[in-house]
Image (cartoon, grey):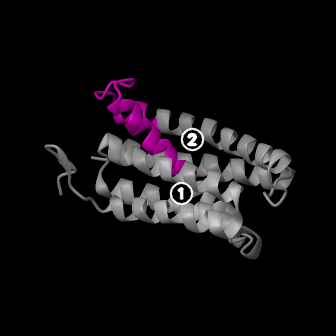
Amino acid sequence: MSEMTGPVARLVPGDVVRALALVSVAVGTWRSGLVATALFLLVLGGTMAPRAIRAPAVLDVAYCSTILFAAWAAQLDWYVAVSWLDVVVHAVTTGLVAVMSVRALQAWGVIDAGRSHGELALLVLGLGAVLAVLWEVGEWAGNAWFDRRIQVGYADTMGDLAAGLTGSAVAAVVVGRRP
């Protein structure tokens, strides 16, 4: 499937998830108010990145589906109901966001497209580590300033950071070994 040809963009599989993200803004707002609105607008914006950089369909769908799932899991208190889900989502999401970030930096010309797989793997690992820290700062700020239901605490933060780093390491290995 061609992503963009001429003046009219053609639909790609990730567009289905982007449509669900758009619907989630309305449903989340209706269900949970302004904090959900901000969350789902952030997710909607994030789902536009793969389209903008013409990411491969598999990465596009995996990344968009994961960030949308993560947001709904938070809104529906699935992280409270299923104790291990938070750690799994942190691992998968951080790894995918790190890969997408490196792809975006390549598309924008910030990172030379000719870098070796090993160099790209190190960038994925490093960006994933930084993103995991920023995510935790965001959770703390969200809890402190907007919504006390956001889970924070030493054990939660350390587990999330370890999961984010692990997910980034796995993503880095995949990037480093890709053909």
**Relative image position of residue 167 (x, y in whole percent):** 56, 52
Which quadrant of the structure image shows residue 16? bottom left
Callout 1: helix, strand or loop? Answer: helix
Q: Tell me what residue is drawn at x 30 percent, y 63 percent.
A: 13
Which quadrant of the structure image shows residue 37? bottom right
Q: CA distance from mark 1 to mark 2?
A: 15 Å
Chief secondary structure of the magenta portion:
helix
For label 1, the residue is: 67
Q: Tell me what residue is drawn at x 46 percent, y 39 percent.
A: 101
Q: Residue furthest bottom?
A: 81
Residue 100 included in the magenta stretch of the image:
yes
Callout 2: helix, strand or loop? Answer: helix
**Relative image position of residue 111 (x, y in whole percent):** 38, 25
Q: Is residue 32 left or right of residue 65?
A: right
Q: Amino acid at mark 1?
A: Ile
- Which residues, given as a range, are shown in magenta? 94-121
Which quadrant of the structure image shows residue 89? bottom right
- 54 vs 11: above or below: above
- 106 vs 46: above or below: above
Which mark, by number, is residue 114?
A: none
The nearer-to-camera label among 1 and 2 is 1
Q: Tell me what residue is drawn at x 27 percent, y 46 percent.
A: 179
User: Mark 2 packing: few (<14 Cα in 10 Å), some, or many (20+)?
Assistant: many
